[in-house]
Amino acid sequence: MNKIGLVVIGRNEGLRLRQCLNSALGKVANIVYVDSNSTDGSVEMARSLSVDVVELDLSIPFTAARARNEGFTRLLQVNPQIQYIQFVDGDCEIREGWLERAVEEMETKPEVAAVGGRLRERFPEQSIYNQLMDIEWDTPVGEAKYSGGVSMMRVVALKQVGGFNPTLIAGEEPELCVRLRQKGWKIYRIDAEMGLHDAAMTKFNQWWKRNIRGGHAYAEGAWLHGKSPEKHWVKESRSIWLWGLIVPVLALIMAFPTHGWSLLLFTAYPLITYRVFSSLKQQGRSSKEAFFYALSCVVGKVPQVQGQLKFHLSRLLGQKSKLIEYKTVEVE
């Protein structure tokens, strides 16, 4: 597969990174691993596998977007003939046959800039939070707005839009896809097994932080591309503010003057939960999966509001947003 290059980004992924690199060795023309100041021996391990390593400059803030861009640049320096780049995070493993299937899709559809497949959690049974992410990864097949951070992209298309926006601390791939679609490119999700992801999310506070990051991403995405016709993440941001802040605050503030009638607004939450639950049941999910995912969608509005506030406060104060990390450090 001399047309394909692989860019892996990571920080302290330990064994997960080794599994990631081994899943692609010998299957692509070149592999570049971009490291964000790991302290677990990731750099040395990658080099022991003859993988080209880029160590990010510590004086510049780390972001996944910046790491992917630097990996992209190094890959083309090493091999200018690369036509397709498979981006993957260090906590993922590429499934057998995915690279060939993705290239086939790109070759038969020259208008496609990025293609993604089914990403699954490696240990969905380990925690309810891992299971929630496994459901989240299961997106519809066909033309899509976004490909996902783990996906194969066309070099020509990436060059045309200038790669990822390195200032974004989250939501960098959807923002890139907005710009790709604005240039006439298409994004596809195909019915093929793409990879295994190891979220290693076992604690409530990890789930909470991930939702804060999600809220931040929605806010920044809407700020950058919220105007018509795209209206990128405007609807999602409005929903976060409405159900995460406005409705509960209004219900409590109006409780006294309405003699408690305003508290009936809280009945909307179980109704929304039931609607999401019913939708997932129709898709074939078990009652347990459907219930917890629906509950997560509703309760998650609260930390997402926190993320929205963090973005807008930083913007108004002229401050750069800092990374919001939820992963635990794994030492090999």
Image: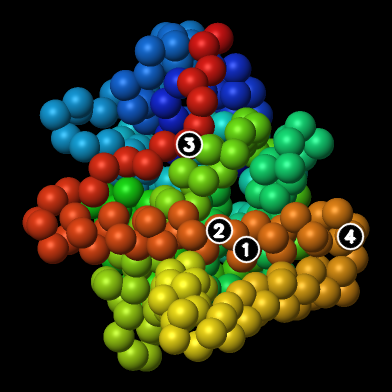
- To which residue does mark 1 refer? 297
Q: How many other residues sit within 10 Å of disc 3, few (<14), some (14-19) or many (≥20)?
A: some
Q: Is residue 182 left or right of residue 224?
A: right
- Residue 117, quarter of the rendered image: bottom right
Does the residue at mark 4 contact the one at mark 1 (Cβ under 8 Å)?
no
- To which residue does mark 2 refer? 300
Task: Tell which of 274 and 211 is nearer to you.
Answer: 274
- To which residue does mark 3 refer? 326
Mark 4 vs 2, N-terminal side = 4
Task: Tell which of 244 and 33 is nearer to you.
Answer: 244
Disc 4/disc 1 C-alpha distance (Å)? 15 Å
Instruction: Name the amino acid, label 3.
Output: Tyr
Does any portion of residue 139 appear in the rendered image? yes
The residue located at (60%, 17%) in the rendering is 15
Instruction: Name the amino acid, label 2.
Output: Gly
Q: Nearer the viewer, mark 1 or mark 3?
A: 1
Expressed as whole percent of the image width and height from the top left, the position of residue 314 reads: 19, 55
Identify the secondary structure beneath mark 4: helix
Does 92 appear above or below 284? above
- To which residue does mark 4 refer? 287
The residue located at (65%, 57%) in the rendering is 296
Does the residue at mark 4 contact the one at mark 2 (Cβ under 8 Å)?
no
